[in-house]
Image (cartoon, helix red, strand yellow):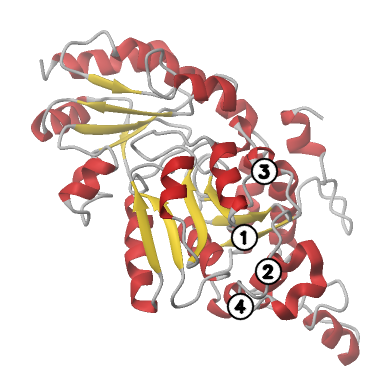
Amino acid sequence: MDFNTALLHHNFGSEKNSGSTLTPIYQVSAFSQESAEKLEAVFNNRAPGFAYTRIGNPTTDSFERRISSLEKGIGAVACSSGMAAVTLSLLNILQAGDEVIASTALFGGTIDLFHDLEAFGIKTRFVSEVTAENVRQQLSEKTKAVFTELIGNPKLNVVDLQSVADVAHENGVPFIVDSTTATPYLVRPFEFGADIVVHSSSKYINGNGSAISGIIVDSGKFKWDPARYKGFEEYKRFGKFAYLAKLRNGVWRNIGCCIAPATAFLNSLGLETLGLRMERLCDNALQLAEFLQGFEGIKVNYPALKGNPYYDLVQKQFNGKGGAIISIDAGSKKKAFKLINNLKYATIATNIGDLRTLVIHPESTIFTHATKEQKENAGVFEGTVRISVGIEDIEDLKGDFEQAIKQIS
């Protein structure tokens, strides 16, 4: 199946009980069974079924299966937010004394998370960018994961997945990739060596800004050595499902940050148009980026632009699509604010991946807790404006940005 056909038909069909074309919202806390023995079997993973929505729900299960199928993984676990997904993807394998290698060009909230983990004895070795060489230099016996965003937000740096995966695997370390800004439409990271993929499904998967959620997908390819990854000994019997089994029966289940059934339903609904939306969003973003290059005093950053340092990698890894985010520098905070405030068709909001164009001043908002050095490493300056391009008619977007830019010239 091609992408859009798979969205609707691969590993998914009508709901068995009623014939509903989309798995309905099972908005209940618990599920009854015909006997105590059956509930025991379900509760202890010895029989299929559902017991309690915190640990399993039909609506959630349908969403998880669809995302796993789309990424060509072996299974997925949905969470209450993208940050919950990032956190649990790591805590499932880390303990005090472990180290993670990650980029300084991460979303501000993820940077904050890595600093929070220091209180639990987990250290992060930050590199300017996650490249094969930078990772190789930071690897040690304490390294238990390499973590990266596939397309940085808002720096828009692009990671060469295969080269980094090769270095990580040579040293027995899993490669965890946050693919939120890329989506499976641009790339399936497992095909380039990634082991775990994380999405903030609040963004492009949901597609309309109606729900907060995240999801963790496992490739099933990494060999978890119980001698190095404590806690995996009892899950060896699950074979390639060891990571998922440990996650579901451990930290994810016990912390309790499950996705709500209504949210899973909204995500499944949005997911069905992901291919159509991403095609339009990427096309709009490229045209708008090229248009904005024509204005004096505006620096434009978009990875699919000719001359961008990641242009060749975008052609190879994403088939020429650069995603739907543009970063521009207006020269100062005052000019950035004036540009933002004069836009008519862009919504001033912190999300990305909506149907409508969204703009934000990252330095004063999502990176407000970061140091000056951290901001610069993430490509965030006083004049930076992040544009999450929407599906509006491109000529309307061009005209809107043109009139706003003229007012700050």
In the picture of the structure, the residue carrying the numbered disc 3 is 190
Residue 127, image x, y percentages: 35, 48
- Amino acid at the residue labelled 2: Asp
Q: Earlier in the sequence, mark 4 or mark 3?
A: 3
- Identify the residue under disc 4: 230
Task: Please state which of the two labelled residues, at mark 4 or mark 3, is closer to the viewer.
Answer: 4
Q: Are marks 2 and 3 in contact (CB under 8 Å)?
A: no
User: In the picture, which quadrant includes the N terminus?
Assistant: top right
- Count residues near mark 1 (Cα–Cα under 10 Å), then give few for <14, some for 14-19, many for 20+: many
Question: Which residue was labeled with disc 2?
Answer: 225
Q: Separation of disc 4 and disc 3 at Cα?
A: 24 Å
Q: Is residue 213 left or right of residue 372?
A: right
Q: Residue furthest top?
A: 294
Report x, y in % for residue 188: 65, 38
Give the number of marks: 4
Distance between the alpha carbons at the discs numbered 1 and 2: 25 Å
Q: Earlier in the sequence, mark 2 or mark 4?
A: 2
Q: Amino acid at mark 1?
A: Ala
Question: Residue at image x 43%, y 31%?
Answer: 356
Return the mark for residue 78.
1
- Report how far apart the C-alphas of labels 2 and 4 lie in the structure: 8 Å
The residue tagged with tag 3: helix, strand or loop? helix
